[in-house]
Image (cartoon, helix red, strand yellow):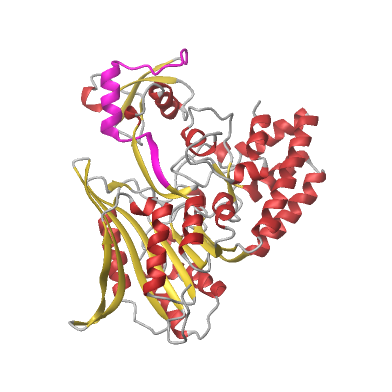
Amino acid sequence: MTTHDEDFPKWNIIFLIYAKLGDDSIGTSPYNPNEDADTLVYLTSLKNEIRGIPLSPNFNIVLIDNEIEVKNGKKISDNTYISVLESDPENLTVNKIDTKTSYDMEDFAQKGDILKLAFQYVETQWPAEKILLVTWDHGSAFGIFKTTIPLSNIGSNFESIIQFNLNNNFDNKYEIIRKQALKTDFVFTDARSSFEIIRNRPYKTDSVITKNKDQFFSAILEAKIDDEVVDILTNDELSNAIKEGFAKQYVDVLVMFNCYMQNVHTCYSLRDQVKFIVAPEGVISVPGYDYTAIARAIANTQGIEAEDVAGVAVLTMRNKFALANLKDKFEEHAMFSVALENYQDKIISKLKEFVQEIRSEIAANILTKGNTVLSRQSCYELDLPLNYSMVDFINWSLRLLTKIGPTEIADIQVDLEAAYHDIITASDVGNNIYTVTSRPSWERESKTAPKGATIYFPSSAMTNDDEVFRIFAAVGAPFRMSVLDEIGWLPFLDELYR
């Protein structure tokens, strides 16, 4: 264990970056379908901001930067660089990011058992008393840094999977062909892809209705939608990497520039390895956090506490968007800082009690079961435009109580809501959360401001046709969420939709 000297900076600010660059890095932005989101542009902007941060003896700034270059759909390089921000004698206006070591190991940032070695290296080279870890890339509710492959490479269950994914938003099945082959008028266009959907067909069979199977497969590949997750840094893996990578086995503040990560699953996994977590309950977009303001707060405030650093991360973000002429876009964000100390006792124990009671009540009363389903269906999903079935637990439970009236659940809900109020140390919730994308009116009936407590809660029975269930929730799933067993959540869902 490294012995810290008073001459060592008080904080390490570590940026953990996963960036897929090249022809696969340009995609449709979830915030504006007409804008291209180019990862290289965003990464360059981030590094430019970091270079402009004034150096201070109160902190080190270190980058663990995993960059993957893709051309013509093929990976041509995959390198990770560990760099530190230093003064540049040749440029007095900005600092330089100086690479100290590098690795050519594939998907470095996705592998927790390897990532811990990078953390150990950072701590050896740049020891500090406190740690601020910033993660940067896409979030997937149950983990970060996701890699996918087209479902056409999956195998025998390919047809059943794509059937579900293509049709779960529609009442009927449709005949599907490629745009290039379109020779008749279409009735409905699926904006998520390059498909045109024509000639409404009744829902009769369990298979996809297409002009031609090979043509349909080709369309799937060209559209690059409905991919299967093949690798991801799960919340549990990140937790273990922190535990085994740092001598004190935790970080003081985790700031996540990753969508959908402020949820029960993330907090449960990281409860012992993170003191304060800052993350969005829904989307997060560039320009993101004000890293300069965070660094200045550490530099200028003697003995600044972790809670205050987390608060700065949340509360300076709105102004950064305003300065970038993106004031309205910030209104789509719900940002929270959550204290994870004693999360098990404060939150998980009450969630277990709530789930046990609701299971008893739906088993005893068919009306309670029906109202539980209805209360879920009226809740807005905070993972749009993706479909992770993430609903704010507090808002759902409040909605439930309006339908079932006073029961023993009410007392548990009051305690749970009060506990959440206690652990949220800072928040900034925009006033345009519910218009990021359109949804049927029955899913937008309840527009109560989110409380920072989303949980996986599908609106219907779970099957292996559902990618999220198959990959993240089912028994034996490759990236299974650990909290599901802890609170008895899956048995509750099974009984609810049985």
Q: Is residue 321 visible?
A: no
Part of the protein shown in magenta: 203-232
Identify the residue at horizontal 50%, vertical 70% (top origin): 315
x, y percent for residue 84: 31, 72
- Image quadrant where one finds the C terminus: top right
Determine whether 166 is above or below 78 in the image: above
x, y percent for residue 188: 37, 27
Determine whether 22 is above or below 62 in the image: above
Q: Is residue 445 visible?
A: yes
Identify the residue at horizontal 32%, vertical 27% (top origin): 152
Please say whether residue 226 is one of the residues in the magenta stretch.
Answer: yes
Identify the residue at horizontal 76%, vertical 28% (top origin): 366
Judge by depth and name the residue closer to the eye, 194 or 312: 312
Identify the residue at horizontal 55%, vertical 77% (top origin): 305
x, y percent for residue 251: 51, 66
Determine whether 125 is above or below 227 in the image: below
Please say whether residue 57 is one of the residues in the magenta stretch.
Answer: no
Residue 363 horizontal side relative to residue 20, left or right: right
Q: Quadrant of residue 187?
A: top left
Picture mark count: 0
Residue 238 horizontal side relative to residue 344, left or right: left
x, y percent for residue 311: 53, 71
As drawn, which residue projects farthest toward the top? 204
